Amino acid sequence: MAEPWLDRVRRAVETGGRLRPNGDSRPHYVVCGQDALAFHVVNGLLATELQAGTVRVTVIVPPRRRADGPDIRAVRGVRILPADRLDEQTFRAAGLAGADGLALLHQDDVGNIHAALCAQEVEPGVRLVLRMFNTSLASGVRQLFPDSAVLSDAVMAAPAFVAAALGEVAPTHFRHAGRTLYVAERADVRPEDVVCAVADTRDPQRVRVLPADPADADVVLAEATGQPAGAELAARRLARVARRRRRPLAVLFRAVRGFATRKIGMAMIFVLAVIALLGYLISRAEDVSQGQALYLTLVTTLSGADPDTNKPTAAQIMQVVLNLAGLALIPLITAVVVDAIVNARLALHTGQIQPDRSGHVVVVGLGNVGTRVMAQLNDFGIEVVAIDKDPEARGTSLARRLGVPLIVGDAAQEETLRSASVGACQALVVVSTDDVANLQAALNGRAINPDLRVVLRLFDDDFAGRIERAFGISASRSVSYLAAPAFTGALLNRAVIATIPVGRHVLVVAEVPVAAGSALDGRPLAAVAESDGVRLIGHTQVGQKRLDWAPDPRMVINAGDRLTVVSRRAGVAWLLRQTSPPPPVPDPPTVPA
């Protein structure tokens, strides 16, 4: 027997859930995408369950699976819905009506906006989380969809790549509750400005985030007065190696070497070798000096010689061969000149002719992430050389506008890396969308310079960690792993204030409300510290707007309070479970009279 409509409304109100057509009061989230970001977001949603089955997740994926990245279809506990288009029919089939949130995670800004408009027709009140590269559209999209979050994974991940490339603390800063907080080394801030101990990075092989003893941390979250001094300090420290060194002779030699093609060069070398050998033989046969032998050789080769039947047979043969070599030499010289002009124009157009540099950073791949990394390095005053095999890549126009040298070529080829002076750069950042090409470029760069700092982007975070350990790569990053906590928090309607990348770890600064009847409701604030992955930095009581930055651990938590924390990914999942309402108790079965 179906549950009466009024009883369904009553249960939805009591449990704080949305009214769903099927009467299921469990939270329901719809995720669109099948890349690594969607995979991590789905796992983040499932990690918030108090018990298995208390959260429903539907994933809309294209019918054809992508070859790269993790397989989201293998995640247990989710419903997979293959669909070619994200339209109203697809969203109705996914059960979007009554859903709590919709995440549009495709790498297509216009497609995500179109899908959001279709979703509004099915469920006007659903919370939207859109993935967008063009952040300038964010304000317009928020006006179009009031209950939405517009996030860019490239913007979130770029500071981690910049920090890893330069061997510095990520220049992260943000404002919250009227204060500016920034991440810096403990030696660079005053003790009274420290808000939270972030990590102990003194041993690069064993980075400890949120250490039990705050005194062990050398990286801290501190408060700044006025402007974000932490970012300014980081910028000054990062810019100390921005120097350019030119070598005109080496540049000229490299340009001349690249003018002629391999076949023409080999033919020219062969003809000149034949002429030199015959000139030597003529000097021996005619018993003349070296100068006279050179004169006879050049005259015979370039202008020919009068026939002389009285000469010995060997001399006549050498004379004929020299004449033939002269006939071949003139076209070869013409071919070399024409080929040099054409190759020079192509090299200038593709950026292959570059002056030697040192202390710069080479960025491979000008997609979403590479463009952000290049722009941030340029803002810090660091000299950048960009490489991309597509002359019309997303970031090429920005590179030309910023005056960043751009080399159009395959970074997996050693010659392309040498043209960017990889041997003298301070870091190689490889952030294209092809894992195989990224790994090959990183290994070739390490072969050119064994001490080169390499920052490598890989889509699979587990694979990234194994590559870092196996090949000695300085740092490998997964963009989706760095950005997923912010997308998950936005989908759960939790305020993710900032993300802090530390080595291969990522910390989340979030403000989490406490629901009535949750595990933390009625407990002291000290209970938040029961998890090793959570640090409480602020507490806002229900009905108040002022944030207490130094709360008393004995204060009791009430429903409606908001907790501001710095947490690891696992700590976020634990805190969401502790602050969420208990799952609804199913009604006992009705026994017919």
Image (cartoon, rainbow, N blue to C red):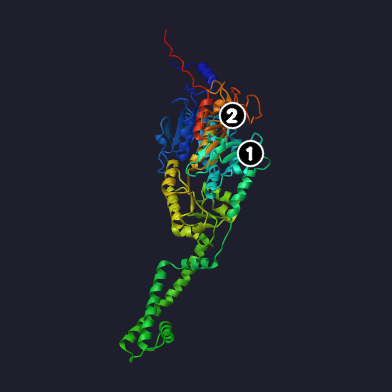
Q: Is 588 located above or below residue 364 in the figure?
A: above
Instruction: Name the secondary structure under disc 1.
Output: helix
Instruction: Name the secondary structure under disc 2.
Output: strand
Going by the numbered disc 2, the residue's amino acid type is Leu
Residue assigned mark 1: 191
For the residue pair 329 and 541, the one nearer the viewer reads as: 541
Mark 2: few, some, or many residues within 10 Å (few <14, many ≥20)? many
The image quadrant that residue 223 belongs to is top right
Name of the residue lying farthest toward the left: 313
The residue that appears at 60% across and 53% down in the rendered structure is 240
> Is residue 113 visible in the rendered structure shown here?
no
Image mark for residue 563: 2
- Quarter the N terminus occupies: top left
Residue 329: percent from left, percent from top: 41, 77
Position of 181 with respect to 352 (left or right) is right
Residue 437: percent from left, percent from top: 43, 51
Residue 262: percent from left, percent from top: 41, 67
Going by the numbered disc 1, the residue's amino acid type is Pro
Name of the residue lying farthest toward the bottom: 310
Residue 267: percent from left, percent from top: 39, 72
